[in-house]
Amino acid sequence: KMKKLWCPRSHAVLTHVGKPMIRGIDAVCTSFHNAFRGASIDSVEVKDERVVALSSQIGVVTCTMEIKGGNYDAKSSWVTTNVFNYDEREQRWLLVEHHSSPVLFPAVPPKVEQE
């Protein structure tokens, strides 16, 4: 199923936390499989989706993922950037790059103005 989301003719790129860049559709799918293998994930909720750049062939989308499950009903937030390419042959948008990072400091203090 994962391969259906990705552009097969591109050099698929994936960045998972703490790992070097992963290239190629087979390596990308293996990394996702390994990331979720044995994980006790109850749900993944996508929030705050935003198209931050769009042309006729390239789209960049950011979002926040709320992942729930695991030991002690854990919850974690991740910020994600996905890059899509419009495939003329397939007549649909396909993923070419995915980058995610955990939110370690969820509240950013407001900027304090100097008087």
Image (cartoon, rainbow, N blue to C red):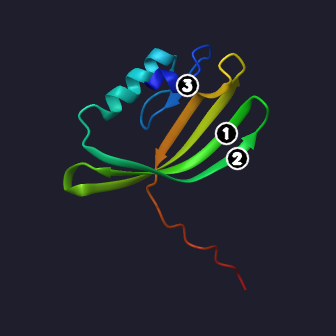
The label on residue 92 is: none
Q: Amino acid at mark 1?
A: Val
Q: Nearer the viewer, residue 8 or 19?
A: 8
Secondary structure at badge 2 equals strand
Q: Residues within 10 Å of mark 2 (few under 14, many from 20)?
A: few
Seen from this angle, which residue lies furthest bottom? 115
| Mark 2 or 1, nearer chain start | 2
**Disc marking residue 52:** 2
* Residue 13 lies in quadrant: top right
The tag on residue 13 is: 3
In the rendered image, residue 64, in percent from the top left (x then y), is placed at 51, 52
> Quick one: 62 or 4, which is closer to the camera?
4
Q: Position of residue 111 (x, y in %)?
A: 64, 73
Q: Residue at x 33, y 56 (%)?
A: 75
For label 1, count other residues whose C-alpha is less than 10 Å away and answer few (under 14), some (14-19) or many (20+): some
Instruction: Tell me the quarter of the image containing the N terminus.
Output: top left
Local SS, label 1: strand
Q: Does 24 appear above or below 115? A: above
- Examine the rendered structure and indicate whether residue 49 appears above or below residue 12: below
Residue beneath disc 1: 60
> Which of the two labelled residues, at mark 1 and mark 3, occupies the earlier sequence position?
3
* Left-right relation of 45 to 6: left
Q: Amino acid at mark 2?
A: Val
Q: Position of residue 62 (x, y in %)?
A: 60, 46
Mark 3 closeness class: few <14, some 14–19, many ≥20 residues within 10 Å = some
